[in-house]
Image (cartoon, rainbow, N blue to C red):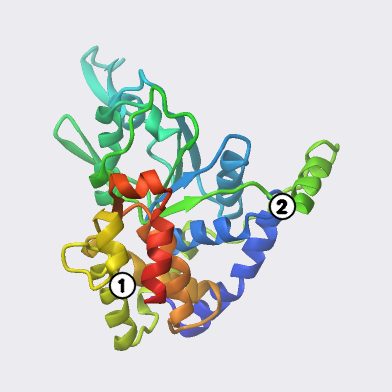
Amino acid sequence: METKEQYKSLVEKLPLLKKEIAKVIVGQNEVIEEILIAFLAGGHCLLEGVPGLAKTLMVKTISEALEMEFKRIQFTPDLMPGDIIGTEILEEDHDTGKKFFKFNKGPLFANIVLADEINRTPPKTQAALLEAMQEYKVTYGGVNYDLDKPFLIIATQNPIEQSGTYPLPEAQLDRFLLFIKLYYPSENEELEVLKSTTAERKNKIESIFTGQDIIALQRLTRQVHIDDSLIVDVNNLVRNSRPQNSTSEFVKKWCEWGAGPRAGQALILCAKARAVIKGRFSVIPEDIHTLAFPVLRHRISLNFRAEAEGISTDDVVKHLIKS
């Protein structure tokens, strides 16, 4: 187990991690912070953004700064579960001449896996991620194969091209700790992107953390203090998102169903992870209010009336926080 001094030295290196990532990624500070929060909380992310916002480059840069194995899977309509999990291949023992099956590991066996455009592959392949995301293992031919830790899946989807896609079912959406939205950069940030990406210079990323460092920080995250009154607030926030027993008329009017107990667990863990990133050992209300949006936005379902009126799940979360 790590000592208090070792934990302190790891936390003090977190700003250096952000600095290294900023060598390549311009802006998107909130998005990067939320990905790191998911990592420390031991969960997975769903990124949604239009093409060209450097989603792949961002994830690859983070993996380099964390000195971890990175794999990218481009999800397509013809992708099969075996293409991501792995398959058995027939091999021959040159000494005895006997043939045997050997499991050939797929791209899922890495520390950080980018599942690009996850909504472009059929449900059968999407479901193959479920066991890996929850159990940190895959099963093939009745044999369990453990995945390396730390392990993070970052799935992306495009919000504008919905034809020919397979929307993720609610049960699988709930497996993602955070649903992170990427927006266009500001004018100054976009200007900096144009300057840096069309020049000859190329910044080298230095590794700040190892896999064992991240595992230690994940243990530290669980130890962060949260007051009982804040846990009650989280419980009330999640329960009020359910129109069946909500005290909010806004929720009853616009929501079909609300978040389950997993949302409360996710919100508390992410709030603890944000406290660690901010150099604190105690959760404050700001942590909960900030992370309520990426934690709840994919766990609340709106009715047809809300969609027709342009009400979003973020509007619901904003109302819940105010009330």
Residue 258 higher or lower than 304, as above or below: below
Q: Residue at x 24, y 12 (%)?
A: 97
| Amino acid at the residue labelled 2 | Ser
Q: Position of residue 200 (x, y in %)?
A: 85, 37
> CB of mark 2 within 8 Å of CB of mark 1?
no
Q: Position of residue 273 (x, y in %)?
A: 44, 70
| Residue 206 vs residue 225, the one in the foreground | 225
Q: Classify 10 Å Cα crowding around label 1: few (below 14), some (14-19), many (20 and above).
A: many
| Residue 121 vs residue 115, the one in the foreground | 121
Residue matched to label 2: 186
Q: Residue at x 43, y 77 (%)?
A: 2
Q: Classify 10 Å Cα crowding around label 2: few (below 14), some (14-19), many (20 and above).
A: few
| Residue 120 vs residue 213, the one in the foreground | 120
Residue 16 higher or lower than 179, as above or below: below
Whether residue 219 is visible, yes or no, is no
Image quarter (top left, top right, bottom left or bottom right) of the C terminus: bottom left
Residue 200 higher or lower than 134, as above or below: above
Residue 50 higher or lower than 212, as above or below: above
> Distance of mark 2 from mark 1, alpha carbons?
32 Å
Q: Earlier in the sequence, mark 2 or mark 1?
A: 2
| Amino acid at the residue labelled 1 | Leu
Q: Residue furthest top?
A: 97
Residue matched to label 1: 237
Q: Quarter of the image holding residue 40?
A: bottom left
User: For the residue labelled by badge 1, is the local secondary structure a helix, a strand or a loop?
Assistant: helix
Whether residue 231 is visible, yes or no, is yes
